Amino acid sequence: MKKFKIKSGDTVKVIAGDHKGSEGKVLQILADKDRVLVEGVNLVSKHTKPSAQNPQGGIVKKEASLHISNVLLLEDGVAVRVGFKFDGDTKTRISKKTKK
């Protein structure tokens, strides 16, 4: 299984592509495709058929995935790169900029 420096629930900033500059919370990480779903970013229109749950049908807006290389972790409103620090047996994520 691949390991990423960004986790679900992190706040990230989009640094490349059509939605550059947008910020949002990571909803899901798609590890097999190296992609992330970010809340409120890269919305696409999905046409849905009428069904039991949605008898009207219609057009639904939902998030599409972004490549994980196009997002950076936000710390105090500033985009930062992430590293790791070992304290004995514990491994913690740190900001390369502030060392926190």
Image (cartoon, helix red, strand yellow):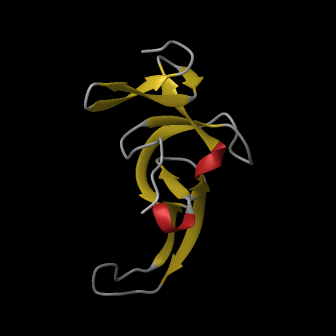
Q: Residue at x 52, y 19 (%)?
A: 77
The residue that appears at 28% across and 80% down in the rendered structure is 53
Q: Which residue appears farthest toward the top when viewing the image?
A: 98
1 sits left or right of 22 in the view: left
At x 58%, y 67%, the residue is 45
Q: How many labels does the image show?
A: 0
Q: In which quarter of the image is the N terminus?
A: bottom left
Residue 79 versus residue 94: which sits nearer the camera? Answer: 94
Q: Position of residue 24 (x, y in %)?
A: 49, 39
Specify whether 74 is left or right of 42: left
Quarter occupied by residue 44: bottom right
Q: Position of residue 81 (x, y in %)?
A: 57, 29
Residue at image x 46%, y 42%? 6
Residue 65 versus residue 47: which sits nearer the camera? 65
> Residue 20 vs residue 62: left or right?
right
Q: Is residue 69 above or below residue 43?
A: above
Farthest residue in the right direction? 17
- Asked if residue 29 lies left or right of residue 21, the reply is left
Q: In which quarter of the image is residue 33?
A: bottom right
Outermost residue toward the front?
A: 88
Q: In which quarter of the image is the C terminus?
A: top left
Residue 17 location (% of width, % of height): 74, 47
Does residue 88 sit above or below 65 in this rendering? above
Vertical order, 70 against 22 (above or below) = below
Question: Residue 52: percent from the left, percent from the top?
Answer: 28, 86
